[in-house]
Image (cartoon, coloured by chain):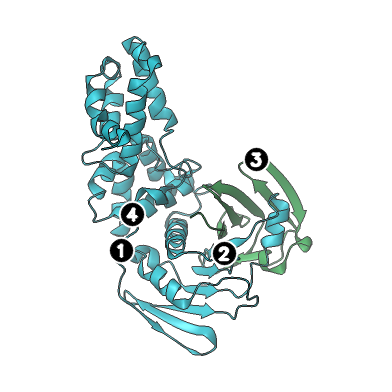
Chain colours: A cyan, B green
Amino acid sequence: MTIREQWVSTAKYELLQSPGFAALPAASRDTLERWMPEPGNELSGFLRFEVARLLRSDEYKNAAPPAQAQQLEQLMEAQSFRPAVAVVLATPRSTRAPYEVVRGEDGQHTVRVSGREVPVKLAPLQDDSLHQHTVDDVAKGLAGLPPLQLSQVTKVVVAGAPNPSDAAFGEHIGRRDFRSYMTAGADGVVTIYPAPNAHGQRELDATLLHETGHTLSHRRWGHDATDGAKWAPWREAIASDRLFVSDYAAADVGEDFAETFALYSQVKGTEQEAGLRQMLPERFRLIDALVAGEQ
Amino acid sequence: MRHPGQVTFADLDAGTEKVVAVDTLPEAMRFGTSADGVTLPVTRVEARLRGKQRVVRELGPGGEVLRSTVQRSIF
């Protein structure tokens, strides 16, 4: 066992013995304990490691219990243990729904998956130095989506040339090297662009999962910045859970939904689900209702 | 539908904004389609970092997201 694994495994026990934990308000004690489920998961593991490191620091050990409690509150507030993006928190699912690629003429194909037929347009590659996803990559990506996200996709276009908007994006957001990978339209059309470096299946899967989460939430609840009332339950769930699954989720309420929903979809039915459900109970409850068609 | 003529580009990480005349932008990015299938002008473009990726969202006049574009590999 590595030192990290040892710290992660004993962090909760050490925390519960700490006078600083006892000095926390009851609500904070409950929350912190809830964030450290058994068995652990990646997010809980990151938190446990940070807790263990804090408990071993001189600043914590030399502080009186009220000051220790303050340091624990700061850890809960700052959440510096979070990853940048949620996709690293769950092992990609090895299972995909059965699918079939019906190859048509002129690059007009159809992917049949989970009772749906999704048109896939594969445009001729205009520059041989670029890499383009195949219709089989797309079919695998669609087959890896949970049914609710899959239902958001009306068509996939594998473009033969870079996004014509790249230069304008690059110039006006100050990133002249900007090159699009994937565009998800509100109308359910997903466009995937060729790139100088090949993109792997994992990136296709993860990006489709995240972006179709946005498409779903916009259709059900409107835009998070302008449809405040419809997003109120999600905002309340964030306030109750307190925990964000990634730095990007903390950026705004819409990204929190997409990141949390992607993680939910990845862990649903796996041994990680129970732990994450304990850590994010209100958001998982809302997603349960959404998946069941109640939201 | 006519475009109002200007598009605001916002870098949400840097906190900066600039306004650009729409006729300087490619045709493909001037309009988008809403979830209801309605063609709407793109009036605001917001960029933000997601891990190692930059994400660009193109918004309509009511703040609705018309397109979301993700940049390059994160793996």
Residue A213, given in percent of the width and then of the height, sits at 43, 57
Q: Above or below — where is A56 with respect to A91?
A: above
Q: What residue do we see at 70% from left, 54% from top? A: A176
Q: Above or below — where is A19 with respect to A251?
A: above
Q: Residues within 10 Å of mark 1 (few under 14, many from 20)?
A: few
Name the residue carrying label 4.
A91
Name the residue carrying label 1.
A94
Residue A19, given in percent of the width and then of the height, sits at 26, 15
> Can residue B55 be seen?
yes
| Closer mark to the observer between disc 4 and disc 2 | 2
- Helix or strand or loop: what does disc 1 sit on? loop
Chain on which label 3 sits: B
Residue flagged by tag 1: what amino acid is it?
Answer: Ser
| Closer mark to the observer between disc 3 and disc 2 | 2
Q: Residues within 10 Å of mark 4 (few under 14, many from 20)?
A: few
| Closer mark to the observer between disc 3 and disc 1 | 1
> Can residue A215 be seen?
no
Residue A289, given in percent of the width and then of the height, sits at 29, 53
CB-based contact (under 8 Å), mark 4 and mark 1 = no
Tell me how far mark 4 sits from mark 2, CA to CA.
Answer: 24 Å
Chain on which label 4 sits: A
Name the residue carrying label 2.
A197
